[in-house]
Amino acid sequence: MISGYGKILEVDLTTRQLAFQEVDNDLARKYIGGVGLAARLLWDETSANTEAFSPGNPLVFMTGPLTGLIPSSSRHSVCAISPLTGIWGEAHAGGDWAGELRHAGFTGIVVRGKAEMPVYLWLHDGNAEIRDARHLWGKDTCEVDTSIKKETDAKASISSIGIAGEKLVRIACIMNDGEKGRAAARCGLGAVMGSKNLKAIAVRGTQALPVANKQGLRESIARIYAQSPVKKPDETIEVEIERLKSFLRLGNVPVKNYLEGTFEPGYKLADGLRETMPLYCRTCPYFDMESKLTRDGRRHMVWEHWGPLGAQCLIGDADALQEAYLLCNRYGLDTISTGGVISFAMECYDKALIDEHDTGGLRLSWGNAEAMLELVKQIGEKRGIGELLGEGVKLAAERIGGLAREYALHVKGLELPSHDARASNYLAVMYATGSFGASHMDGITVGRVGYEKGQTGTPQDQESARTARFRIEGTAEAVVRAQDLMSVVNSLVVCCKLLSWRTVRPDHLLELLNCITGWDMSLEEFNRVGERIFNLKRMFNVRRGISRKDDNLPPRILTHKRGSGGAAENLPNLGVMLNEYYRVRQWSEEGIPLSEKLTELGLGECVPPGIRGRRR
C-alpha cells in the first residue's frame, strides 16, 4: 500500500457484494485522489448515455493523501453524473467524516447498483457492512445521525440524505455530522444517493495513517503553518465581518435574482456574526464565516445560504434565514440552488408568469420570509409548487414557458453561487467554463487572483486583484491556472481556504505530499496533474454534449447593468475572454481539447473519433 493511501471500498448494492482494492501507484501519481481519481473512474465506467438515476452511475466518495494529516484537511469529495445538469457533478464537504474514513483505513468508497430496500453502510477499522435502513427512511439528517450513532458508535461520523434525497429532488445534497450541518451540497448528488436506496454511510476509525517521512512531515508542517498563526475567535470574527461587508461594497452579492447591486440589510446580517461561536473541522485550528455555531450549539447559517435565500430574495430577517438554513440541512437541500429556485419563483410571480393558483395560495412577493420558509418545506417534501422548483431553475423554466427562461439564472443547469460575476471578470470566465456549472469551488473566488504567479493571498495581493477585477486581457489565463490548481487541491483533498487567505502556497502542498507519499514529484509534474484532471473532466462533459455553446452566462449577467453598488456598470466581455481561455487551454474554438493537448497530458484515449479540433 502506498504511504498516504488506504483502501478503496467498492460496494455493489444490487448484489450486496463488498470488495477492497489497493490504490495503484501509477494511477495515484497521475490523479492523486479526490476528484482526480473519481474523474478517472467515472470516465472509465460511464458513457454518453448513462442516466444519473441509473444503477450504472457510480457514486464516488473520495479523500486524498493529505486528508487527515495536515491542518485544514478533513475534507472529502463526492462525484457522479449530476441529475440536475446531466454532466459531471462534484461536491465537497468538511467536518469529521473524511478524517474518520481515513482512520478507518479507507481512501474512498465507490457505490454501484441499487439496493432492493433502504440500506446504510457501516465502516470501522478496515471492516465494512451493509445494514438495513428501512427504519431510517423518512427521517431527516439529524435524526439519522442520532439513530445510527446509537446503533454503531457514539464517536462515528454519519453522512446521510434527508427526505429530499429519498424523493429524488434534483437539488438534494448529502449532509454529514448531524447538527453541525456539513454539506456536500452541489449538483444534486443527494438524489443520486437516494436513487440507490442508500440512506447513509457511517464511519469510525482508530488506525494510524501511513506516512513515508514522519519527521520531515512534522518539520514541514511546523515551518509552513508558522506563517499562518491561529487567531483568537473574536479577532477572526471581526476579520470575517469585514470580509462580508467588503463583498457588499464590491457588488459581489446576488440581489433580487441578480437584478440589483446593493442590499443594505446585509451589513446587519454580517454584524450578527458576533453572536456566534467557532465551529472547527477535524484537524483544523482555523475557522471562518462558513464555520460557526449558534449560541445553542446548532450550525449557524453560512454566506452561501444567506446570499441566495437572503439578498437574492430581498429577505433580511436573520431569524427566518437561520430557520430556513436548518430546514435545508435537515431535508438535505443545497442552499445555493434552493435560494436560486425561490428567487426565480418570486420573479416569475412578480412578472405574472405564475400566480396564487400555481403556488397553492402563496404570495411569492419579494422579501416574503414566510413564503420562503414554506417553499423550502415544499421543495424538501416534493409537494405543491415545490415539486416543480426542486427540478432546478433550468427545468422549471422550461415547464413554465414564456419568458421564464430569462429569469432562470444558471450555467449548464447549475444555479449561480453567492458571488455576482459582474463584480469580477475573473468570476465570469470561471463560472462559464466550470466543469460542473457555475461554482465558486472550481477556482479561486473574487479578490484572490494571483496564484498562477505563485502569490500567496496576502492583503497586498488581494488588493491588487480587486483593482484589476474588471480587466479583460490576462483574466482568462488567471482562471486557467486557478482551475488547474483547484483540481489538485480537490484531489489532495484539502480546504481551498489554505490558498485563499492563508500563506500556504502550491509548492508547500507539494512538499507535504512528497513527505507523506515518499514521492519525488516536481512542481512541474504537480501542476500538470491539475491540468490533466481538468481536461479529463472537460472530456467527460464533451462526451455528454458540452461545447462552447454551453460555456456561457445568463443573459442578465452579460447585458443588465445593476446601476448601483461596487460593480454598478460592469458587464463581462465573455466572448473575448473565452477566446483567450481556449487559446491558453489549447482547446479548439468550439471548446474541445485538441488531440495534441490530450496526448501530451496522457489522455490520448479520451479523444473520440471525429472530434479532433483544429489549432487556432
Image: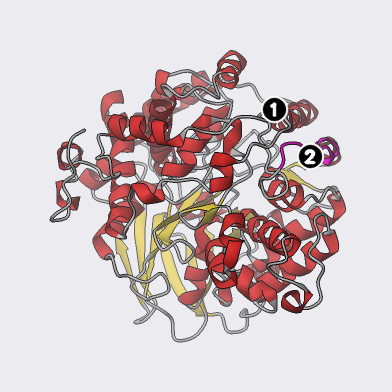
Q: Residue at x 46, y 51 (%)?
A: 77
**Among the 4 quarters of the image, the one containing residue 379:** bottom right
**Disc 1 marks which amino acid?**
Gly
Closer to us: 494 or 273: 273
Characterize the local packing of mark 2: few (<14), some (14-19) or many (20 or more) Cα atoms within 10 angstroms: many
Residue 210 vertical position relative to residue 62 in the rendered view, above or below:
above
Of mark 1 and mark 2, the one earlier in the sequence is 2
Q: Position of residue 566 (x, y in %)?
A: 69, 27
Residue 417 is covered by the magenta coloring: no
Instruction: Give the magenta-colored segment's residue range.
Output: 260-269
Would residue 143 be found to the left or right of residue 399 on screen? right
The quarter holding residue 48 reads bottom left
The residue under label 2 is which amino acid type?
Phe
Query: 287 and 546: which one is in front?
Result: 546
Q: x, y (%) of residue 9? A: 37, 63
In the rendered view of the protein, which quadrant contains the C terminus? top left
Question: How far separated are the C-alphas under marks 1 and 2?
Answer: 11 Å
Residue at the extreme bottom: 116
Residue at 54% x, 40% y: name it.
558
Image mark for residue 263:
2
Residue furthest to the top in view is: 460
From the image, tell me which residue sits under label 1: 566
Residue 54 at what x, y percent from top left?
38, 75
Q: Secondary structure at mark 1?
A: loop
The circle drawn on residue 289 is none
